[in-house]
Image (cartoon, grey):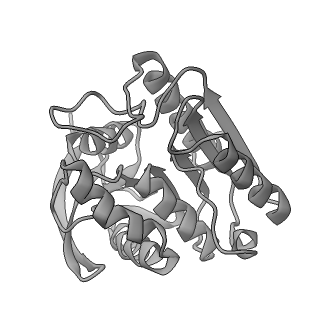
């Protein structure tokens, strides 16, 4: 019996050599692809395991890199890199497009059936791909109710799902309201799930280094958010075209 396989992929983006994690489902046929973006700290085993889980479900999954192969565990260093990035839609789009190109050109990927899912900074990258008009079947974000440049959300051509903790001080109600207003004005098919009592990065298991204030793991909501991501993919990107037809 064949099983899911993984490999490391290197590609240039943002002036760095990025090191992504590609997970391939069993078999040799083409499958839908999922671009998976990490929190601001960067690619870790958390995202690698999520990519592997998506491959077990039948998707070609690429967990992309933000920091040139580095995991930035120091909060001050992470913010020093991510805050300018989050303020620069073109840089975010460059990082997203480079990873999307890797996923699209993978022979196992059906290039017309790709979704982008991201957490924190990786979710902001996924949304910017949509605002840039990238051909995606779905966009899913957790902790990334970020808004873009005026009018550009009209280029989003797929459903958008966003999940956020009710007590997230980094993505507070005002940010959520602005995101909702942007999606409404653009006529996007969008949904927002608020997880009661959850902080920022509630989906991410505890780490052994300092974190920015307002971050905290919530086991039950982490499981719910993962199910919500999987449900989004099942709806918009079924592994076989006849499912849900």
Residue at 42%, 30% in the rendered image: 202
Using residue 175 as the reference point, say whether residue 229 is left or right of it.
left
The answer to which image quadrant residue 108 occupies is bottom left
Give the x, y percent position of residue 160.
66, 51
**Vertical arrangement, residue 193 with respect to residue 117, above or below:** above
The spot of residue 56 in percent (x, y) is 34, 37
Query: Is 113 or 74 nearer to us in this picture?
Result: 74
The C terminus lies in which quarter of the figure?
Answer: top right
| Residue name at image x 47 percent, y 63 percent | 125
Nearer-the-camera pick, 193 or 176: 176
- Name the image quarter holding the N terminus: top left
Compared to residue 242, the image places residue 228 above or below, namely above
Residue 212 place in picture, x, y as percent: 33, 42
Q: Nearer the viewer, residue 218 or 213?
A: 213
Q: Residue at x 29, y 28 (%)?
A: 205
Q: How many marks?
A: 0
Specify whether 177 is left or right of 239. right
Residue 114 appears in view: no
Vertical order, 93 against 78 (above or below):
below
User: Is residue 36 something one can see in this rendering?
Assistant: yes
Which residue: 58% across, 64% down?
136
The x and y percentages for residue 106 are 32, 68
């Amino acid at each position: 019996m064949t099983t899911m396989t993984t490999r490391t992929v290197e590609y240039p983006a943002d002036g760095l050599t990025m090191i992504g994690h590609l997970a391939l489902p069993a078999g040799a046929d083409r499958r839908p692809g999922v671009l998976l973006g990490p929190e601001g700290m960067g690619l870790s085993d958390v995202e690698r395991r999520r990519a592997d889980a998506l491959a077990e479900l039948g998707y070609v999954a690429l967990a992309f890199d933000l920091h040139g192969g580095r995991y930035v565990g120091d909060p001050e260093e992470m913010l020093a890199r991510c805050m300018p990035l989050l303020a620069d839609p073109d840089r975010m789009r460059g990082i997203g497009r480079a990873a999307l190109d890797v996923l699209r050109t993978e022979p196992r990927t059906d290039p017309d059936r790709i979704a982008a899912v991201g957490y924190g900074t990786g979710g902001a990258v996924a949304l910017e791909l949509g605002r840039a008009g990238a051909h995606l079947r779905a966009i899913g974000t957790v902790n990334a109710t970020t808004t873009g440049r005026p009018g550009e959300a009209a280029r989003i051509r797929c459903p958008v799902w966003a999940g956020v903790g009710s007590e997230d001080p980094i993505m507070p109600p005002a940010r959520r309201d602005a995101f909702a207003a942007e999606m409404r004005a653009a006529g996007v098919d969008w949904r927002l799930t608020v997880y009661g009592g959850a902080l920022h990065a509630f989906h991410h298991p505890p780490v052994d280094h300092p974190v920015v204030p307002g971050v905290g793991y919530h086991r039950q909501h982490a499981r719910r958010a993962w199910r919500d991501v999987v449900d989004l993919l099942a709806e918009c990107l079924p592994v076989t075209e006849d499912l849900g037809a």
